[in-house]
Image (cartoon, grey):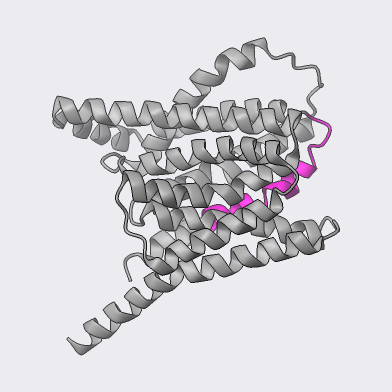
């Protein structure tokens, strides 16, 4: 089926991000803002070099395509990508602020809330259809998130802000389909870096950077930023935001299993129940789409 490549893309993206904690743990001696700043600057630099020197023909074609559109369409494309860069920058900055000043659990909770917000916003803004069974999965996910946030209202609040900024980013990409996906991502990260630049200039970078730090930042920039983000926006080319949003759950689920089996962290009954509900909600959410694909295959076979 043609949509299989989009499912592979979104599953690959969030699976990669799920293993991000393994790399981050090796950089415990450096602040979260150190990692964010070097990660975003290096990602933007790499993508600019690839776009300008390795993909000049694509850049030229994209430029010609852009100027072939009506002024109204050009302004819409520019506006969407500036907004996308803004929401990326906002998401990255708030994520780091919460990581440093609130709690790590609040950032983890954000990954769990984001799919719910994405599904609801896609329904409200993009008018994407959700079946009754999918609404039931949304309720299950919400219950799981509320269970995980019990006794930590501020964690829930900050998680909502992080999740809302990324959910809006995902929604915007459904309206951002005209241009080359890699070029679009390059422009968005470039705008994000511009918006974050004042914070880079005023932040006091006290920790001495080691060769190991630069190697890990290179790995993070390529493997955990450029590749999954490209796969993410590529998946949005062929899948509704609500479906892409639900696969965000792969990230915290992988983190959950890593915490237990790799980092040897203790599991509470409440956490186990919450993650079980999330896994069940993912299965339930995808049942209508799976049934639809089966019916289409049967219809094609009959013809």
- Of residue 227 and residue 15, the one placed in the foreground of this image is 15
Specify whether residue 172 is painted magenta: no
Q: Position of residue 275 (x, y in %)?
A: 67, 62
Residue at the (25%, 29%) spot, across then down: 76
Say if 118 sits above or below 285 in the image.
above
Q: How many marks?
A: 0
Asked where in the image residue 74 lies, by quadrant, the reply is top left
Residue 52 visible? The answer is: no
- Of residue 283 and residue 274, the one placed in the foreground of this image is 274
Residue at the (34%, 80%) spot, across then down: 294
Residue at the (48%, 65%) spot, across then down: 136
Instruction: Find the magenta span and give its range.
Output: 12-30
Give the farthest residue toward the top: 202
Say if 220 sits above or below 73 in the image.
below
Q: Position of residue 130 (x, y in %)?
A: 36, 61
Q: Which quadrant does the C terminus fall into?
A: bottom left
Asked where in the image residue 154 lies, by quadrant, the reply is top right
> Mostly what secondary structure, the magenta segment?
helix
Q: Position of residue 228 (x, y in %)?
A: 52, 48
Give the farthest residue toward the bottom: 302
Instruction: Specify whether 256 is left or right of 29.
Output: left
Residue at the (72%, 49%) spot, across then down: 150
Residue 170 visible? The answer is: yes
Say if 52 sits above or below 283 in the image.
above
Q: Position of residue 112 (x, y in %)?
A: 60, 51
Q: Which quadrant does the N terminus fall into?
A: bottom left
Instruction: Specify whether 238 is left or right of 32.
Output: left
């Amino acid at each position: 089926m043609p949509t299989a490549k989009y499912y592979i893309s979104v599953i690959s993206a969030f699976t990669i991000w799920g293993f991000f904690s393994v790399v981050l743990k090796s950089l415990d001696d450096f602040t979260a803002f150190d990692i964010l700043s070097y990660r975003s600057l290096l990602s933007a630099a790499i993508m600019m070099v690839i776009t300008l020197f390795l993909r000049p023909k694509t850049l030229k074609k994209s430029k010609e395509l852009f100027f072939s559109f009506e002024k109204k369409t050009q302004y819409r494309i520019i506006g969407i990508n500036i907004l996308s860069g803004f929401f990326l920058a906002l998401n990255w900055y708030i994520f780091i602020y919460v990581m440093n000043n609130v709690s790590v659990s609040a950032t983890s909770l954000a990954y769990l809330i984001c799919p719910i917000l994405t599904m609801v916003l896609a329904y409200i803004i993009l008018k994407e259809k959700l079946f009754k069974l999918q609404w039931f999965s949304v309720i299950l996910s919400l219950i799981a998130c509320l269970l995980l946030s019990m006794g930590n209202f501020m964690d829930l609040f900050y998680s909502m802000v992080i999740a809302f900024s990324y959910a809006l980013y995902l929604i915007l990409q459904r309206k951002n389909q005209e241009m080359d996906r890699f070029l679009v991502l390059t422009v968005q990260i470039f705008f994000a870096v511009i918006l974050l630049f004042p914070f880079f200039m005023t932040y006091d970078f006290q920790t001495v950077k080691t060769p190991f730090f630069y190697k890990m930042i290179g790995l993070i920039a390529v493997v955990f930023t450029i590749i999954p983000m490209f796969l993410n926006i590529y998946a949005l080319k062929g899948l509704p935001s609500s479906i892409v949003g639900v696969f965000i759950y792969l990230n915290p689920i992988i983190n959950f299993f890593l915490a237990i089996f790799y980092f040897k962290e203790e599991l509470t009954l409440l956490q186990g129940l919450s993650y079980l509900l999330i896994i069940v909600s993912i299965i339930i959410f995808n049942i209508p789409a799976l049934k639809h694909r089966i019916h289409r295959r049967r219809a094609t076979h009959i013809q």
